[in-house]
Image (cartoon, rainbow, N blue to C red):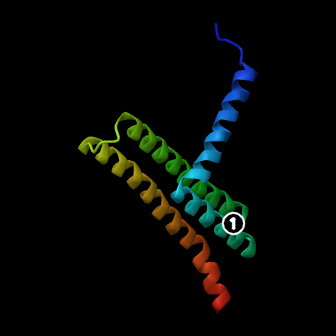
Amino acid sequence: MTQPINIRKALKSFRYAGVGIYDLFRQENNAKIHLLAAGLIVIAGISFKLSATEWCIITIQIALVWSAEAFNTAIEKLADTVTTDYHPSIKIVKDVAAAGVLILAISAVVVAGFIFFPKIWECLN
């Protein structure tokens, strides 16, 4: 038999997640860069009157990059808690986690290019 949903526990989890989002953007330089980039993209999207589908795609890309940055930060903090000394395996873990963010960020730029370049081209012609 399944247990009913504990609303108080769920709300507490959301609060912890909110604190995590706040800490991410308050403490992590790269997260601040991603936040600024997202803000500029939203302004551009409003200016170019993106379609609902385009907004969905942009929103997914922003969320993916922010999520990757959050996971990367969590991995880095955990690794630093394990040891502050240099360890080759921890270096690889941190580098690979950072690579995941970079891969998604590049993907987001490519997707933004597919959406915005035709609109910019149209304005120029």
Furthest-left residue in this view:
88
The number of numbered discs placed on residues in the rendered structure image is: 1
Quadrant of the frame with the C terminus: bottom right
The answer to whether 83 appears left or right of 74 in the picture is left
The answer to whether 7 appears left or right of 98 in the picture is right
Residue at 67% over, 40% down:
18
The percent coordinates of residue 8 (x first, y second) are: 75, 22
Residue at 50% over, 68% down:
110
The percent coordinates of residue 83 (x first, y second) are: 34, 37
The answer to whether 111 appears left or right of 40 in the picture is left
The amino acid type found where label 1 is placed reads Val
Nearest to the observer: residue 46 or residue 21: 21
On screen, 25 above or below 34? above
The percent coordinates of residue 17 (x first, y second) are: 64, 37
Quadrant of the frame with the N terminus: top right
The answer to whether 107 appears left or right of 33 in the picture is left
Q: How crowded is mark 1: few (under 14 residues within 10 Å), some or many (20 or more)?
A: some
Residue at 46% over, 47% down:
72
Residue at 40% over, 48% down:
97
Identify the secondary structure beneath mark 1: helix
On screen, 30 above or below 122? above
Nearest to the observer: residue 60 or residue 97: 97
Q: In which quarter of the image is residue 20?
A: top right
Residue bearing the label numbered 1: 42
Q: Quadrant of residue 39?
A: bottom right
The percent coordinates of residue 35 (x first, y second) are: 61, 60
